[in-house]
Amino acid sequence: MKKYLQGAAVAALSIAIAAPVSALEWNVSVWGKRRAFTEHVEKLAELVSEKTGGDFTMNISYGGLSKNTENLDGISIGAFEMAQFCAGYHEDKNPSITVLELPFLGVRNLEEEVALSHELYKHPAVQEDLARWNAKLLMTSPMPQYNIVGTGEPRNDLASFEGMRVRATGGLGEAFKAVGAVPTSVTATEAYNAMESNVVDTVAFAQHAHLSYRTIDEADWWTANLNPGTVNCPVVVNTDAYNALSPEHKEALDSSIDESIEHYLANYQGVLDKWDQILAEKNVTKVEYSDEELAKFRAATKGIADKWIEEKTAQGLPAQELYDLVQAKLNELHGM
């Protein structure tokens, strides 16, 4: 019996020695379903796992860990290690990055959106702003200019926006309010039901979201060239979790960001390439505004940036400096 117990102990010890050290798993909170908007997160998880031989993996949860409007709160308490959120969902929690949601900044494509966002994310005031939530900015989720789908008769000019109920958050909501519309900030996951039940007349989204949240299925028309702006949706990590990474794991994570963004951009281009075909299939009327109407929209929203600077300066942010940084980066990107 004694020999049996000794043999069992030796066997157990051998197994313990042979067993690999427990792998590191991060929980990642996103929402909806896998789509163009989350492809860089999926790619990041894939690359990190490959580079670490499966020793560092990410469990990506689509709504199972938190509401999309509470992801920053979850990061702050360490409920999960990584999350995606949109600034316009809670301007008070991340006022510094809402500068990127101001209307008519002039961003021309997703590549410029990436460059602009990552330039802003490096600013000390922005990092300090997110540090209040124990959050480290990792990368952006670049989206094209938002346009709206609507029900009923097309809104062919700016005058027809008066009283229009539109799902739009942050700076976009302010832009539509400036031309007489009535913005509401229902979340992306609630947008279809709001449209179906006639709570809103229109919904402002990027193309992938109109597809993912099925608002395109309710649409009679689509604004092809309004291009009032977009939302900024960072991916952040819990600062303590990031600092606790081994040098090897940290290198695997950091070195995978650029490739993940490139994958996102290539994938999103596929959505844009198919968009006109989808509109035709669903018999959605394309509304294109004249230069005169677009000029009216820009004129009506001109004071929003000044208001943003005034309000955020009063909150203690270097708002003018952040706005000037955005403008300077855009001028650089545009070769001006």
Image (cartoon, rainbow, N blue to C red):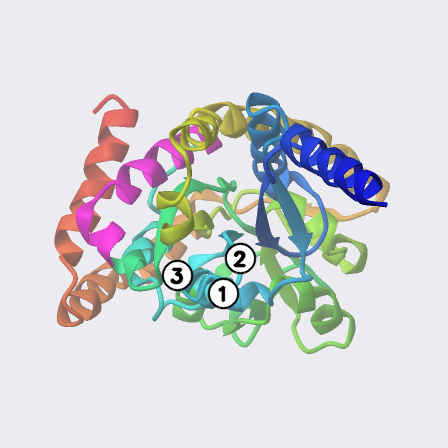
Q: Secondary structure at mark 1?
A: helix
Q: How many marks?
A: 3
The amino acid pointed to by label 3 is Gly
Q: Are marks 1 and 2 in contact (CB under 8 Å)?
A: yes
Question: How busy is the neighbourhood of tag 2: few (under 14 within 10 Å), some, or many (20 plus)?
Answer: many
Residue closer to the observer: 26 or 215: 26
Measure how far apart labels 3 and 2 are at the Cα level.
28 Å
Q: Is residue 87 left or right of residue 271?
A: left
- Residue located 18% across and 71% down the image: 315
Measure how far apart labels 1 and 2 are at the Cα level.
6 Å
Q: Secondary structure at mark 2?
A: loop
Q: Is residue 107 left or right of residue 204?
A: left
Which callout, 3 or 2, points to the residue nearer the camera?
2
- Residue located 45% across and 25% down the image: 258
The magenta segment is 110-128
Residue 109 visible to the viewer: no
Residue 325, percent across and down?
A: 19, 42
The amino acid pointed to by label 2 is Phe
Q: Secondary structure at mark 3?
A: helix
* Mark identifier at residue 17: none
Which callout, 1 or 3, points to the residue nearer the camera?
1
Residue wearing tag 2: 80
Image quadrant occupied by the C terminus:
top left
Residue 128, percent across and down?
A: 23, 56
Up the image or down, 311 lies above or below 45; here it is below
Residue 152, percent across and down?
A: 74, 66
Measure how far apart labels 1 and 3 are at the Cα level.
24 Å
Residue wearing tag 1: 74
Please name the predominant secondary structure of the magenta segment in the image.
helix
Residue wearing tag 3: 171
Choose the circle earlier in sequence order: 3 or 2.
2
